[in-house]
Image: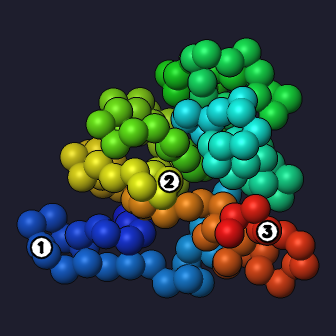
Amino acid sequence: MKNIKVLYQTMKNPGSNKIEMLSDKEIKSLLKNSKTIAVVGISRDRGKPSHKIPKYLKEKGYKIIPINPFADKVLGEKSLKSLAQVKDTVDIVDIFRPGDEVYEIVKQAVALKPKIIWMQSGIKNIKAKKYAEKYNIAVVMDKCLGKEHHRLVDKDKPGTGIFLK
């Protein structure tokens, strides 16, 4: 697997303070070339971002694997208790859990070898980020996957992304 640059807030070289960000073109390519998203912390509550964002992404053609130990089904898909139960290839692990829970989630996510681990808006965990980077997995912290998808991939389509404002 080639070394992947890490998105946002990421050190270019271990021990270095230099930050390297992927270009919008690179992020757009990553999003366009991904098909399956495991969503940790997906909600059954239609009013929450942790339901709206995966719903939007599913409508855009992504396969969503819900991870919620308290739900049987979300968005019409069987919900799994944890990432350890995922059998499919996963391109993106999208995390909607508090920052202090992220490290354990990322430890499970690394076993799936996703292209990227994405911590949603307001979610940061430096220890988890560094752990994922050891395995050359790209990491985004504190960014909304739905907003970034809309901004880079779906921006020219009228009526899309309205709920993301």
Q: Secondary structure at mark 2?
A: loop
Quadrant housing the C terminus:
bottom right
Compared to 61, does 108 lie above or below? above
Q: Secondary structure at mark 1?
A: loop
Q: CA distance from mark 1 to mark 2?
A: 25 Å
Q: CA distance from mark 2 to mark 3?
A: 18 Å
Type of the residue with mark 2: Gln
Q: Is residue 127 left or right of residue 3?
A: left
Type of the residue with mark 1: Ser
Compared to 142, does 8 lie above or below? below
Mark 1 near mark 2, Cβ–Cβ under 8 Å?
no
Q: Secondary structure at mark 3?
A: helix
Mark 1 near mark 3, Cβ–Cβ under 8 Å?
no
The dot on residue 162 is 3
Of residue 4 and residue 138, the one placed in the foreground of this image is 138
- Residue on which disc 1 sits: 16
Q: Looking at the image, which residue is at 55% across and 35% down? A: 40
Of residue 42 and residue 109, the one placed in the foreground of this image is 42
10 Å neighbourhood of mark 1: few (<14), some, or many (≥20)?
few
How far across and how far down the image is residue 51, in percent? 70, 41
- Quarter residue 31 falls in: bottom right
Q: Earlier in the sequence, mark 1 or mark 3?
A: 1
Compared to 147, does 58 lie above or below? above
- Residue on which disc 2 sits: 120
Q: CA distance from mark 1 to mark 3?
A: 39 Å
10 Å neighbourhood of mark 3: few (<14), some, or many (≥20)?
few
Of residue 2 and residue 132, the one placed in the foreground of this image is 132
